[in-house]
Each structure stands twice: as C-alpha cells, then as structure tokens.
Image (cartoon, rainbow, N blue to C red):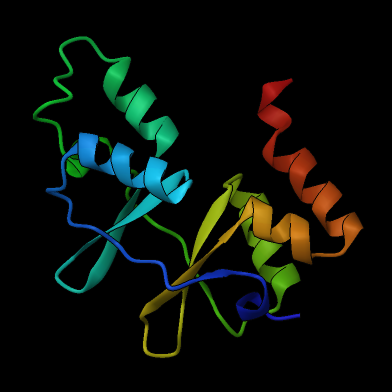
C-alpha cells in the first residue's frame, strides 16, 4: 500500500504570522491536531495543539492575543512522498516518535498529511501495534 492511499488529502498550510488564536479556531473547526506552516512556497514548520499549550500557554509571560505560529511552531519538518510504501513511512514516523507526517509529491508540493489515525485505519495490525508502542513509549 502507498502513502497516498492512506493519507488525508488536500491539506493547506498557513503563514507563520497567523495568530495562535486563529490556529486554535482552525483546529477546532477542522477537528485536527496540527497545522502546517508555510512561507515563500515552502513548508517551514508545524504547529500542534500540544505546541500551543506547552510552548505557549504554559510559558510565563505568553500573550495569546499577540502570539503567532512562528512563536510556537516546531521547525525541522520531516516529510514522506505520496508514492512511498506505507510501511516505510510508518517506520519513519516511529523512528521520529511523531504522530503526523506531511506528504509531498514529486514536485515537492505538500499534498496531504499521514496521521496516526490514518495509519490505524490502513496499515497492517502488527505494524500499527509496533508504531503505537514506539510513539507512546515515553509515557511509561
């Protein structure tokens, strides 16, 4: 199975200058836990609901009214290709201990996101079990 057969398609990114409050509203409206951040036609980061809480709200002096995506985003984004084997992408997510992986096409354009939920619905049971154990291992 290929990544493109399992991923969420049609994912958009927002500017790093997008207000954190707007990010939270977009997450609520879309029932999603992360939003890709793009600038100059390139993916430069990702903001998760956890980023908003841990890098934002939990920090002394954080002003949610003026904070932007750039203030809380995670940089150094890893991606996979839509034509990659799903098992390869899942192992990559497992190694990185991440729950979401942007998907790009041959033209280096983001075309979707592969999430833990997508993996749970599409990957073989033994691969899902191995991945979930690995990603959640730090909780023990």
Residue 11 relative to residue 4: left or right: left
Q: Quadrant of the N terminus?
A: bottom right
13 or 42, which lies in front? 13
Extreme residue toward the top, this view: 60
From the viewer's perspective, is 13 left or right of 30? Answer: left
Residue found at x 32% / y 37%: 24
Q: Is residue 133 left or right of residue 82?
A: right
Q: Is residue 7 above or below residue 101?
A: below
Residue at the farthest front position:
29
* Image position of 54 with respect to 124: above or below: above
Q: Quadrant of residue 51?
A: top left
Rendered residue at 20%/74% (across/down): 41
Left or right for 111, reference 131:
left
Q: Nearer the viewer, residue 121 or 46?
A: 121
Q: Residue 61 at x, y = what percent? A: 15, 12
Residue lying furthest left: 66
The answer to which quarter of the image holds residue 10 is bottom left
Image quarter of the C terminus = top right
The x, y position of residue 114, in whole percent, is 57, 63
Number of dots carrying numbers: 0
**Residue furthest to the bottom:** 106
Placement of 39 over or under 84, stated as above or below: above
Residue at 8% x, 29% y is: 66
Residue 72: x and y in percent read: 27, 35
Q: Residue at x 46, y 61 (%)?
A: 78
């Amino acid at each position: 199975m290929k990544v493109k057969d399992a991923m969420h398609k049609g994912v958009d990114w927002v500017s790093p200058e997008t207000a954190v409050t707007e990010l939270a509203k977009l997450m609520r409206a879309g029932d999603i836990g992360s939003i890709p951040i793009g600038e100059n036609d390139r993916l430069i980061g990702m903001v998760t609901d956890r980023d908003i809480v841990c890098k934002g709200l939990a920090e002394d002096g954080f002003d949610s009214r003026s904070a932007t995506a750039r203030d809380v985003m995670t940089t150094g984004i890893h991606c996979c290709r839509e034509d990659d084997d799903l098992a390869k992408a899942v192992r990559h997510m497992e190694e990185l201990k991440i729950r979401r992986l942007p998907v790009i096409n041959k033209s280096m354009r983001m075309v979707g996101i592969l999430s833990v939920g997508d993996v749970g619905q599409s990957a073989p049971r033994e691969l899902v079990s191995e991945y979930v154990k690995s990603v959640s291992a730090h909780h023990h």
